[in-house]
Amino acid sequence: MGFILETRGLTKRFGSGAHVQTAVSDVSIHLTEGEVYGLLGPNGAGKSTTLKMICGMLRPTEGEILFAGHAWRREDLYAVGSLIEEAPLYPNLTARENLRVRTALLGLPESRIDEVLAAVDLTGTGRKRAGRFSMGMKQRLGLALALLARPRLLVLDEPTNGLDPLGIEELRAQIRGFADAGTTVLVSSHILSEVQQMADSIGIIYQGRLAYEDRLRPGEDLEELFMAVCREGRAAQREVAA
């Protein structure tokens, strides 16, 4: 089976010598085109580090990343939209002006601005500067920036941060809509109930290692599965320590 994104033995270490720390070790994930893949794990498990390597923000220490069947290269970033940590906004510019800067950099038609503003429900922000947006509005503008180039792969790290329950529900529907239209979505989230409702496949990272990866089966209890994987990870750690 071909994958739109595949990692093989992805590893990231920080520091050197006696101070080296391994954040991610031997992670191999597989995303098929047009699916929503939920990347799960406890805080500090290595989810964000993995996503940053996929998006070119960090260089892997070991391993490789394949995009659409070939070794990852910088040009592939044009086919990847991402929202990791804080949205890269100019606080003194409006939503439309922020998007206009990105369209100019990417050589995209300005008609895309109205399309993505409508997609994230920010058409009514007018002259309000992004620095005065609520956290939820900033998240939605960051999503609009990620969507501008019609990416084949959309990478979202905790995209529901700052959203109220209605905003979370709307975002969930949007993510499913992106996948249904052919865009693959890789999303990390700590809200298991939301991932349960939108993901096709899941990967669970525990202590920097991929502890589980599979399709999410209808009726499967994701919270129960997640806790079982984490318990197994803790038990394995105790055995090693003993």
Image (cartoon, grey):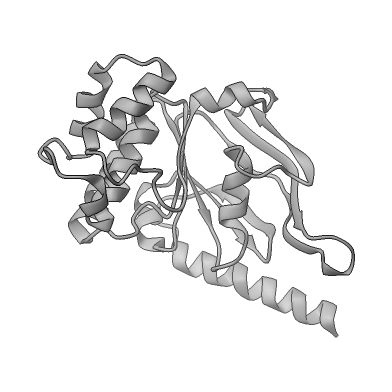
Q: Quadrant of residue 150?
A: top left
Callout count: 0
Horizontally, residue 62 falls left or right of residue 188, namely right
Q: Eyeballing the image, is 142 above or below 132?
A: above
Tell which of 70 and 22 is nearer to you.
22
Tell which of 234 and 139 is nearer to you.
139
- Please state the horizontal and vertical placement of residue 2, each as a whole percent of the image: 63, 25
Residue at image point 62% right, 49% down: 50
Q: Eyeballing the image, is 64 above or below 114?
A: below
- Please state the horizontal and vertical placement of residue 40, each as a whole percent of the image: 52, 58
Horizontally, residue 212 falls left or right of residue 123, namely right
Residue at image point 22% right, 32% down: 96
Residue at image point 84% right, 77% down: 240
| Residue 82 visible from this viewpoint | yes
Q: Residue furthest front?
A: 92
Q: Quadrant of residue 22?
A: bottom right
Tell which of 196 and 140 is nearer to you.
140
Specify the quadrant that holds the N terminus: top right
Horizontally, residue 38 falls left or right of residue 96, namely right
Specify the quadrant that holds the C terminus: bottom right
Q: Residue furthest bottom?
A: 242
- Please state the horizontal and vertical placement of residue 106, each as a whole percent of the image: 43, 20
| Residue 175 visible from this viewpoint | no
Horizontally, residue 110 falls left or right of residue 108, namely left
Q: Eyeballing the image, is 195 above or below 144?
A: below
Residue at image point 61% right, 37% down: 56
- Please state the horizontal and vertical placement of residue 154, each as a whole percent of the image: 45, 35
Q: Residue furthest right?
A: 17
